[in-house]
Image (cartoon, helix red, strand yellow):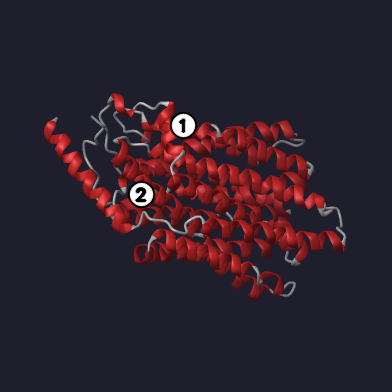
Amino acid sequence: MASMDTARPARLSFPALIGFATPGFAIGALSVAIGVYLPNYYAAQLGLPLAVVGAAFGMVRLFDSVLDPVLGALMDQSRTRLGRYRPWLMAGAPVLMVAVFMLFDPPAGATKLYLFGWLALYYLGLSLSVLSHVSWASGIAGQYNERSRLFGAIQFIAVVGATLILLPPILLAKAGGARAAVPPMGWGIVLAVPVGALLAILSAREPIAASTHEDRLSWRDYVAILSRADVLRIAVADFCLTLGPGWMSALYLFYFHDLRGFSLASASSLLGLYIAAGLFGAPAFSWLAIRIGKHRALMVASTAYSLGLLLLPLIPRGAYPLAALSMVFQGFLAASFAMLDRAMMGDVGDAIRLEQGKRRVGLLFAMITTAQKFGTAFSITLSYAALGWVGYQARHDVVNTPAAIAGLQWVYLTGPIVFVMLGGACFIGWRLDSTRHARILADLETRDALEASAA
């Protein structure tokens, strides 16, 4: 007999919804701080070569990505009095806190080994925190539209965190630039991690499933999941939709300072507008997904995002209002990417549970986090390698040639346009819409009722 939850959680109230979503605050802040400021900090301020910084982020993420399917499988098979995923969220918080503190406040003369080592611990803590939270969220939100609501709330809180983490570089730009701003960013994240985990634990209950032999994971389960077309589509799409924006993030400060002529404070405020636009983009695309389906909403967002980037070279140098308008437009669209991908993977988890009689949510979300890690790894490694290829130098005391600056523009735009378009194209012909998902849920409820009666 397949495992069966002893109680299906009720729809979360609005306060509980926001409380459960609060771990997203630190994750959103980290996506900006790690993706935009930290690589630049180690390359431009601490003097590590671009190739070394790119290799550090790339190699550690590739190594760490192998761990996610193992963690996902372990989470799916966990049986504690606190639930499946809640203990893992609690375990990830201290690991993440220590690694963030060490990365964002390094000692003088930090070496590449220092960066490699603490990045490895950071990504372990990140995997524990993100994977447990999104897997737990998928179990709480069982309905097609409720899943859009919950993941929309998580994305909304993540955007709040990503926006507020920009206060240090904006406020401290004149006090020492990135060198003065990066450590306070780390301190804020260290405080946010335990608060988010505690609020999530207090805001929602987790159904506890009975332990049965059919929940044990074998190599056949891996093969069955990896060979599914819907799982592969989402994983490839998530890889592309992470690689594209991540490519821009890695080069953002170089592009907007050296080519667009903005100061660190102005560039940071523009980035704040990009991120803050997600406060409206996340609920807007959650609403749109309910109306036209998640896959169609994602295709609309990815297409508009890529086309919008084509207009960026037309904006005059130093034209803040036009640059702000462009950033708001792009940020509004980008907020939908991770939210809709994760919600669709939760729908696939219901289909797998109906077909196989097994709950594999943790393993499925491990596919997403693995794809994201590959995307992030390649975004920094490839973009930094491309910068070196066009002759651009990252050190703050170096003046780049006009040819290197022109190369910076093409490197900055090419990756995001290509990969975001590919990410949206992955959902052409997608079939798991609201109608089909409703039939899956009805069949699951009928089967669960029969199993409960038999038990």
Task: Using residue 294 as the reference point, say whether residue 125 is left or right of it.
Answer: right
Residue at left offset 60%, top offset 69%: 308
Q: Residue at x 37, y 35 (%)?
A: 85
Relative to residue 318, is residue 180 depicted above or below?
A: above
Q: Quadrant of the C terminus?
A: top left
Q: Are marks 2 and 1 in contact (CB under 8 Å)?
A: no
Q: Is residue 91 visible?
A: no
Q: Residue furthest top?
A: 213
The quadrant holding residue 364 is top left
Q: Nearer the viewer, residue 135 or 325?
A: 135
Location of residue 371 (image quadrant) = top right
What residue lies at 45% left-to-right and 52% top-to-bottom? 341
Q: Position of residue 40 (x, y in %)?
A: 71, 49
Q: Looking at numbered disc 2 in the image, what kind of residue is underneath it?
A: Asp
Between label 2 and label 1, give the one nearer the viewer. 2
1 above or below 189?
Answer: above
What is the total number of numbered labels drawn onto the structure image?
2
Tag 1 secondary structure: helix
Give the residue pinned by disc 2: 347
The residue where tag 1 is placed is: 71
Instruction: Looking at the picture, tell me which residue is in the foreground, 174 or 278.
Output: 278
Q: Amino acid at mark 1?
A: Leu
Q: Position of residue 32 (x, y in %)?
A: 59, 52
Q: Is residue 179 left or right of residue 192?
A: right
Of 269 and 159, which appears nearest the observer? Answer: 159
Question: Which mark sits nearer the N-terminus, 2 or 1?
Answer: 1
- Looking at the image, residue 127 sits to the left or right of residue 106; the answer is left
